[in-house]
Image (cartoon, grey):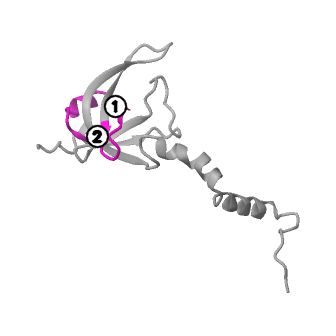
Amino acid sequence: NIKKRKTKGINAGNKIKRTKKFQRRADLSYRSRIFHQIYNQPFAGAPQAKGVALEKIGIEAKQPNSAIRKCIRVQLFKNNKKITAFVPRDGCLNYIDINDQVLLCGFGKSGKSKGDIPGVRFQVLKVSGVALISLFRNKKIKPRR
């Protein structure tokens, strides 16, 4: 009769840490405390989301910079939340019309805003199913509705 016990030895720390992390996820109070924040965010844990462009807006950059960053207001399909998304590259706002379908992604800063754009945590990837960078480089044209 071999008893199952805690691993011992000089290199056992990683295994102990891994099993403790795995077992904590079974605890209901831990799960609701840690994972509820993911699903209250606009993308609800997803890396990308689609939505409809509602309006074009310009957001003033934080000090010491002085510029108007081109952004759009988007209503997401999955939960009808309205968020602000940054439109990258010079003149790409001209490719986006109101009521266009846009694909958004994060800035890559774990849900935090980037640079001098206050309160904007997402950016535009595609417009009407065509990548914004290919429109910018004149590789493709935007399809007509």
Left or right: where 48 falls relative to 141: right
Residue highlighted by disc 1: 89
Residue 140 at what x, y percent from top left?
A: 20, 45
Amino acid type, callout 1: Arg
How many numbered dots are placed on residues in this image?
2
Q: Secondary structure at mark 2?
A: helix
Instruction: Identify the image quadrant of residue 103.
Output: top left
Q: Nearer the viewer, residue 88 or 6?
A: 6
Seen in the picture, residue 58 relative to 93 is either above or below; the reply is above
What kind of residue is marked 2? Leu
Measure the C-alpha gap from mark 1 to mark 2.
9 Å
Picture coordinates of residue 107 (x, y %)? 46, 38
Range drawn in magenta: 75-102
Taking the spot 36% from the left edge, 46% from the top edge, the residue there is 49
Q: Nearer the viewer, residue 105 or 1?
A: 1
Q: Report if the CB atoms under discs 1 and 2 are less than 8 Å apart.
A: yes
State the residue in front, 137 or 135: 135
Quadrant of the image occupied by residue 138: top left
Q: Residues within 10 Å of mark 1 (few under 14, many from 20)?
A: few
Residue 46 covered by magenta stretch: no
Residue 132: give its label. Answer: 2
- N-terminal-most mark, 1 or 2: 1
